Amino acid sequence: MKREKQIPFRIGEATPRCDARTKVTGQERYAADYYGDHFFWAGVKRAGIPHGKLIKVHTEDAKKLKGVVAVLTSEDVPGSNRVGIIRGDQPVLADKKICYAGDPLALVIAENKETLQTALALITFDHEPLPGVFDVEEALRKDAPLVHEDSPGGNLLRLVSVETGKGASAFDECDVIVEGVFETPFQEHAYLETEAGWAYLDDSGQLVVVTATQTPFRDRNEMAPALGIDVEKIRVIVPYLGGAFGGKDGITIQCLLGLSALHTGGVPVKMWWGREESFLASVKRLSARMRYRLGVKRDGTFHALECRAYFDTGAYAGLGETVMTLGLEHAGSAYRIPNVSIKGSCVYTNNAVGGPFRGFGVTQVTAAMERIVDMAAQKLSVDPLAIRRVNAVERGDKNCIGVTLTHSTGIKKCLAALSDHPLWREREGWKMKAGQFKKRGVGIACMAHAMGYPAVVPDFANAKIEFTGEGRFRIYAGIVDMGQGNASTYAHIAGALLGQEASAFELIQPDTERTLPSGSSSASRTTYVYGNALVIAVEDLKKKILDKALRLFSTAQAEELMLVPGGIRHRKDKKKVSLKEVAGLFDESERFYTAYFRSPAATEMLDRIYLGPHIIFSYGAHLAYVEIDTLTGCIEVTGYLAVTDAGNVINPQAYEQQIQGGIAQGIGFALSEDYKAANGHADTNSLATYIIPTAMDVPDMLSVAADNAEETGPFGMKGIGEISISGPVPAIANAVADACGIRIGRNPITAENIFRALWEQNDQERPR
C-alpha cells in the first residue's frame, strides 16, 4: 500500500483535530466511561426545597436496605465540609441549613444503581421552612430573609463601583440621553456530558479521582480541607471533557466522590448525574437586571454612561462576584466613554447557584449596552454602524473603566470588514423582499472580551514535553481540553516548530501527578498562556535535538540541519536520519523539557476594580439577519456574520469552530433558553422543557478574521473561546427592532414575546 505523504503542521493552515477520529468513532474514554469488574455506585439525596432550617436527616431505613454499602451525612465529613473558591460557603453535605433546592443532604453508596435509587427514596428529613428570596432587588431590602446569616453584607455578596471623569454629572453636558432596563435569565450549560467521575484509594492510600472538571489542581486544593486530607494524598485525573462552558469550573462531584471512596474499603466508586439532577444542582449563568443610561453629543460621540447592574449568584458565592466584576469591566463594550458611573451588586438568593458560563458576565452587559447604542443612533437619526465606528476604541485609548489599552485593539478593523461585507451592503434590498405578513430586519453589535485572569491573580502555565526513545513527542498539558480543542492546538504549535505531523505527537491530558500546574481551562486563556510556555520548551528541545544530531552528520553547524517529518535532513546534501536514531543519543534525564510563562498583567489602576483590571482583549462585530412572521411572532435568524479580532489564526478550522459554537449558544440564549425556577423550584428540569438550538435553528454562520496580531501571543494569537457568544442577543434584538420597531428588553425573545409586543404596538396605533 502506498504510504500517504507526511504533512507537517503549519501555522495558519486548517488541520483536523488530533482527537477527532477517536471521538467520532466512540473510542475516546470520558469520565463517565470508567467501569470495572467490581465497583460501587454513589448518589445524593437532594433537598428539593429552596430554604429551610435542617433539623435531622433520617437514614435508618436506607442503611438497612440490602446492597447499601454506606449512607453518609454531614456528620461523616472529616474536614471543614465547605468548598468555595473565594468564600468557602458551600457545604459538601448540608448541615445546618438548606439554601436552595439542589442542596445535598445525604450520600448513598450502593452495590448497583437500582439499590442506590431505592435507598435515596427511603431517606427523609425534618426541617423548619424558611421564607425564601428569589429576586435580586427584593433580596437587598432590609426586611428580606437572609440566605446566609453569617454573611457580613447580608444578601449583598459584593458591591463594585467605578467612576471615571465627571461620572453621572456629565449627563448635564449631553445633547441626547437614552435609557433602558434590560434583563437576562439564568442559562443552563446543557453540555453533552453530565457530571461524572470515578474514585478509589490506591495501594498507597492516595485518593484518586477521575472526573470531568476544568480545574484539576485547584480542585485538589479545595478537596483537601473539605475532606480533611493532605493535598499531596489526592490525585485528580481529567480525561477529555464532553463539554463544560464554565459549568465544570470548580467543584461539582469531586468531594462527594472522594468522600465515597473513603468508605468503600478500596473498591472503586462511580457517580454520574442524570440530566434532571444536573439541571437541578449544576451552576447557571448568573441572571442579571441592568439599568442603562447613555449620554451622547450631537455629533454622535459618547459622553457619559451610567450602569446599575444586579447579578444573581444564587445560594452560594462560587465565582459569582468575579463574574459580575468582569461584566462591569466591559459595561461600556468596545467604546471610548470619558465619563462613567458603574455600580454592580452581586446578590445571594435562594435560586440555583450562579457560576461561570462562556462569556463570564460580559454576555449580560453586552446584551444591554449594544441595544442602548442602537437606541442612541435611532434618536440621532444616524446609521448604527457609523455611530459605532466613531466611538470604537483604538490602541492607546482608555476603556470604560479608564484603563489604557496598550495591546492589540482591533475593533475598528472588525467594523471596517463588516461595512465592506455584502451582508451589510445589500441589507436594504434583502429587507425589501420580505413575503406577505413577514418583516425583515438587520441588527449589528460590537463586543470586547478580556483574556486571562484579573491583574492581581497570577496567570501562568508550565509546559512539559518529552522526546521519547522512539523519536516521538509527548506533550503533558496541565490545562483541560473540555472540547474546545486546545490540546490539539498544542500539538499544532509544537509540530510547526519541530516540522512534524500529527502522528508524531501523543497528548497527555491533565493529571496532578504527571502534568504541571497551569491554571484553569477558562478565561479565553488556554492556548495563549500554555502555548507561550510550550513555545519556550519546544525551542529548547529543538536546539538540543539538532545539537545531538550533529554526531550523525559530517557537518559541524547545526544551522545546516532541519527537522522534517520523522527525521532530520541536511539542507545541502539532503542526507536524512530518523528521529529515532537521534533519540538514541539522549540520556533519560535529557528527554524532558519544561518551561514557565506568566501572562502580562495590568500595572495601573489596580484598585480601580475588584481584583484589578485586564489589559489584553479580543474584539468582535456581529451582524444578524432575522425574519419575523407578524401573524404568529415566530422569528428565524436567516443569516449571521461574525468578524473577530483574536490575533493571528493558528488553525482556521479550530478558530471557526469556536466562533460558530459561541454564536449557536448565543442564539439559544437570545431566542429560547431560559432556566425557570418559580420560587426556587425548577420548572425547566430537562431538555424537553429547556430548549436549546438544533441544526434547524442555526443559520449559515460566516466567520471573518480581522488581521491584527497580538505581539505577546504565540504566533500572534489571543483568546477566541468566548468573544463570539456576546454578540447574538444584542444583534438579534437590534434586528427585531429594525424589522418591527419593537424593543424587547428581556431575552429570550420568543415568538410569544414578539407577538405580544406587536399586539401592543398595533393596539396603540388603533384609532380611539
Image (tube, rainbow, N blue to C red):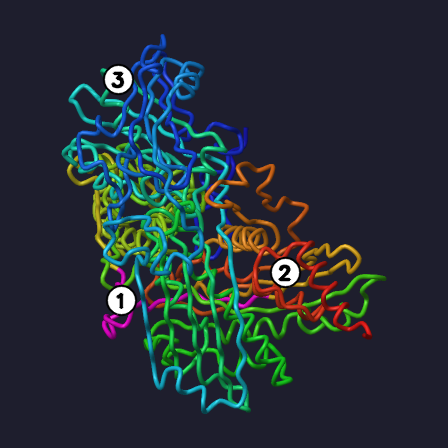
Depth check: 555 or 459 in front? 459
Q: Please provide the residue range marked out in magenta.
A: 599-622
Please identify, in this view, whether the residue under mark 2 or under mark 3 is nearer the observer: 3
Q: Secondary structure at mark 2?
A: strand
Q: Farthest residue to the right: give it.
A: 436
- The part of the image, by quadrant, that contains residue 265 is top left
**Residue 291 sits inside the magenta stretch:** no
Spatial separation of the CA atoms under disc 3 and disc 1: 45 Å
Please tell me which residue is depicted at 35% across the width and 16% down the height of the picture: 62
Q: What type of secondary structure mainly makes up the magenta span?
A: loop
Residue 270, image x, y percentages: 36, 23
**As displayed, is residue 514 above or below residue 694?**
above
SS at badge 1: loop
Q: Does residue 554 appear in the picture of this structure?
A: no
Does residue 206 lie above or below 678 as drawn? above
Q: Residue at x 31, y 34 (%)?
A: 54
Q: Amino acid at mark 1?
A: Gly
> Mark 3, residues whose alpha carbon is within 10 Å: few (<14), some, or many (≥20)?
some
Are there few (<14), some (14-19), or many (20+) residues within 10 Å of tag 1? Answer: many
582 displayed left or right of 308: left
Rendered location of residue 593, percent (x, y): 21, 45
Look at mark 3 in the image and give the residue it sits on.
264
**Residue type marked 3:** Thr
Q: Nearer the viewer, mark 1 or mark 2?
A: 1
* Residue placed most toward the observer, 92 or 510: 92
- Per the rendering, the mark at residue 612 is 1
* In the rendered image, the vertical position of residue 481 relative to residue 292, given as above or below: above
Q: Give the answer, above or below, for where 542 lies relative to 98.
A: below
Residue wearing tag 2: 640
Which one is earlier in the sequence, the residue at label 1 or at label 2?
1
